[in-house]
Amino acid sequence: MSKAIQIRGLRYRYPDGTQALNGIDFHLDAGESVALFGANGSGKTTFVMHLNGLLRGEGSIEVCSMPLSDETLEQIRSKVGVVFQDSDEQLFMPTVLEDVAFGPLNLGLSPDDALTRARTVLKRVGMAHALERAPYHLSAGEKKRVAIAGVLAMDPEILVLDEPTTFLDPPTRRDLLTLLRSLPQAKVVVTHDANLARALTTRAVFFDQGRIAGEGDVIELIQRFHWEYS
Amino acid sequence: MHHLVIDRWSRGSSSLHQRDPRAKLAALLVFLIVLSTTRPAAQWAFAAYAIMLIIAVHSARLPILGLAGRAALVLPFSATFALLTWWSGDTLRALALAEKSFLSGMAALLLVATTPLTGWTAALESWRAPRMLILVIQFVYRYLFVIAEQAQRMRWAAVCRGSHKTGGFRLATGLVGVLFARSWQRADGIYHAMLARGFRGRFVPAAPAPFRAADALFFSACLAGCLAVRILL
Ligand SMILES: Nc1ncnc2c1ncn2[C@@H]1O[C@H](COP(=O)(O)OP(=O)(O)O)[C@@H](O)[C@H]1O
Ligand SMILES: [Mg+2]
């Protein structure tokens, strides 16, 4: 089976000296979905920032069989859509519609096509009623939907979600889960939410201090690392 | 999240809001040139400029006091120069200096308050303004939001832990460093998000609207008005 992502020996040290990643080997098959578990500070977010080259560590990263380099960076960024943990960072344009059109415009679509595509994905995530609203006035669940729309508008092959349900209440989580399940893309989902992981993925990877401490079936891994609080 | 009032104003729907950003930018330019070349002795002209602005603000359905208050923010800077001029004995010049800076501030603010940021920066770009300049404007504008938001959060956090309005200033001066560190971090996050969605150093405008007859008419009226005041008064 062809690999959507293949990573070998990834290490990363922040400028202040924190060694956040310590030799990560990771792969994602085409169309597959994987959950990333691990304690706060174990390096999950740092890892995710490498998947589209926002951070550049040592080691090799291949996305859709392309090695990540300065030449492939743009192409890889359009293939890997990252939904950040904090929606307020992700939504920076004055209106919802403009925000979602931001990516397609950068891809070189004409304004008309970009706006059409933005409207289509906003409808897809159930936010067609809020086109002209300011993103920072939306509820947390709505912001997350718009952030996802902004990424979907780039038509990515792989969706990366960093703790997508963290700030959401249970009903909103449920709705988001339904939305995410309906999206066909391969997914890398960072989460503490065992329900989300079970519903969305089959395989899981456990991060510990910048390394992968274990990997396998979601339910088995949750039990092995006692990753439920009840 | 905190937001700038001006951003909300800029999304109004008055006839002034609907004018093409290029027409408004050109009108502003004419106004600034005419204003800056008006003789200090022509005090009636300054009154006429002010009236023109008031009419424009009124037709944009914006609060005149709110705008004037914000435009007055430029006064402390020009007041320094005005005072120096006054001390050297030239009262009229000093007065004109203050009037000019206030009216310029007001006019520029009026443009920004009736035109979304993407509109007037696209206008600048279509006039081949240096790309770097436009980027800086756009980033500063966005980071103003970021800083305002962080400041708001820190203020709330302080108020929740018993800080009072009176103690606010002391607190603010002590925490300015933290504010900027946090704003920097947030701004960095936003920049990452922009890169992640294919940002390549240029904001692509979404909807360049056609330049209409009404826009040409608006600009002509502004031009005629400014020149008339400048020459006749
Ligand atoms: N910008 C940064 N500068 C320095 N250290 C950082 C930065 N961001 C994260 N870290 C550190 O890197 C480690 C991994 O953090 P992170 O990837 O955010 O973990 P997680 O997402 O699993 O909670 C932590 O020790 C954290 O303190
Ligand atoms: Mg994290």
Image (cartoon, coloured by chain):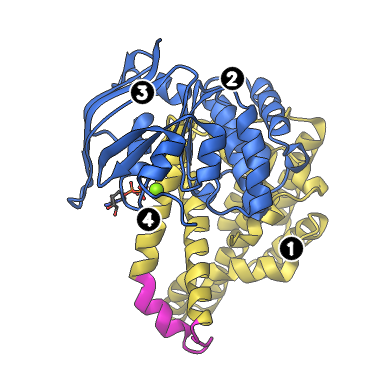
Residue B92 location, x and y as percent? 56, 75
SS at circle 4: helix
The answer to whether residue B226 of the structure is visible from this angle is: yes
Between B106 and A61, the one nearer to me in the picture: A61
Proximity of marks 3 and 2: CB atoms separated by less than 8 Å: no
Tell me the CA gap for discs 3 and 1: 57 Å
Q: How many marks?
A: 4
Q: Position of residue B28 (x, y in %)?
A: 63, 48
In this figure, which residue is indicated by the disc labeled 4?
A: B184
Residues at marks 4 and 1, common chain?
yes
Residue at 42% from the left image edge and 53% from the top image edge: B186
Figure chain in yellow: B
The chain that appears blue in the image is A
Give neighbour class at mark 1: few <14, some 14-19, many 20+ (Cα, 10 Å).
Answer: some
Q: Residues within 10 Å of mark 3 (few under 14, many from 20)?
A: some
- Residue named by callout 3: A73
Q: Are marks 3 and 2 on the same chain?
A: yes
Residue kind at label 1, given as amino acid type? Ala
Amino acid bearing label 4: Trp
* Above or below for A159 versus A167: above
- Mark linked to residue B48: 1
